[in-house]
Image: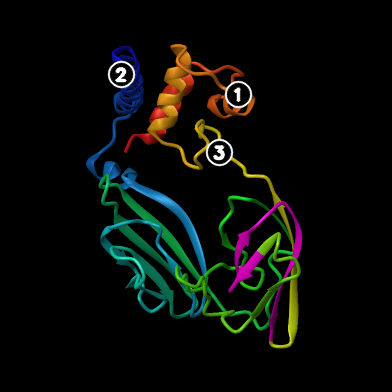
Amino acid sequence: MKKLIKILAGFMAAATMLTCTSFNLVSAETSVSAEETTETQVKEMGTLYIRKGGIKVLDQLEPKNVTIENEAVAVIEDYPYFGDMYQVRAIETGTTRVTYETFATGEIQAWDIVVEDYPETYELSKSELEISLNYFGKINIIDPYNDSYKDPTTGGSIYNDDAVWASDNKDVVRVELGRLYPQAEGTATVTAKLDGVVYECKVTVTPIVYQTGDVDMNEKIDLYDVIFIAKYIIGMNELDEEQASLADYNGDNRVDLYDAIEISKTLLP
C-alpha cells in the first residue's frame, strides 16, 4: 500500500510539474504589456445561437461578476431550478456578449450571443439517432436550436411542450417530453406530433459506451481510474481487453505511467 501511495504521489507531482513547466515556458517566451495581459486572460468560449424568446443555461457553476453588454438583445437571469447558475434569455434579434469570472479558478470567460428570428416552421433536426444504453438526454428533433427551457424535472421545452411523444418499441426506448430512456439494445421509432404534423426519428440503442480513461467502467473518469492503472503497473490487478483499451489514454497501444499521468492531469483544477 505504501508503494502504491508513492506511485500515485509521483503521478500527481509529475502532472503538476508538466502543467507548471508549460506555463513557465509561455511566460518566459512572451513579453506583453499590462493591457495585453488583461486581454489574454479572457477565454473565448464560442458563440451561442438563440432564437428570439429562447433560453440557454450557462453551464458554469457559481460564476462571479456576470455581465452582458446589450440588455436590449438578451438578459441574464437566475436559473430557477439549480442554485448559483444563470441563464440567458433572448429578447430581440441582434448580438451581444456575456462575460463572467469562474468560481473555481477565477478565469475570465466570455460567450458571444447571437439572437435570431423564430422560424416560421419547425425543422426536423434528427431523422436517425444512435445512442448507447447509458445515454440520457434530450432528442430535440423538433427543437434544432436546442435553446428551449431546460427543466431538469420534466425535460420540457418552451417550444414543444404541447408535442405528443411516443415510441413504437418501449422495450427498446421510452420517451417522455423528448427525453430518451434506453431500455435494451435494438431499434425504435420515436415520434412527436405537433400542430398536426408528425416528426419521426429512428433510434438505435447500442451497448454501453465507456470513455477512454474510465478504466473501472463506472461511467466517469476519476481518481479511482488512476489507482486502477497504478495497481496494474505494480501487479496488484489485471486488465481485460476492454479495460486495457480504456486505460490506454494516450493511444500508444500500451498501459503505463504516462497514461496515469495524462488522466491525472484531467483531474487537476
Magenta residues span 174-194
Circle 1: element type: loop
Sequence-wise, the earlier of marks 2 and 3 is 2
CA separation in Å, label 2 and label 1: 24 Å
Q: Which residue is mark 1?
A: 240
The answer to whether the residues at label 2 and label 1 have Cβ atoms under 8 Å apart is no
Q: Residue at x 63, y 81 (%)?
A: 163
Sequence-wise, the earlier of marks 2 and 1 is 2
Q: Residue at x 42, y 58 (%)?
A: 111
Which label number is shown at residue 211?
Answer: 3
Say which amino acid is labelled 3.
Gln
Circle 3: element type: loop
Q: Nearer the viewer, residue 127 or 102?
A: 127
Q: Which residue is mark 2?
A: 5
What is the crowding at mark 2: few (fewer than 14 residues within 10 Å), some, or many (at least 20)? Answer: few
Say which amino acid is labelled 1.
Asp
Task: Estimate the x, y position of residue 188 in percent, counting from the top left.
Answer: 75, 62
Circle 2: element type: helix
Quarter of the image where one finds residue 179: bottom right
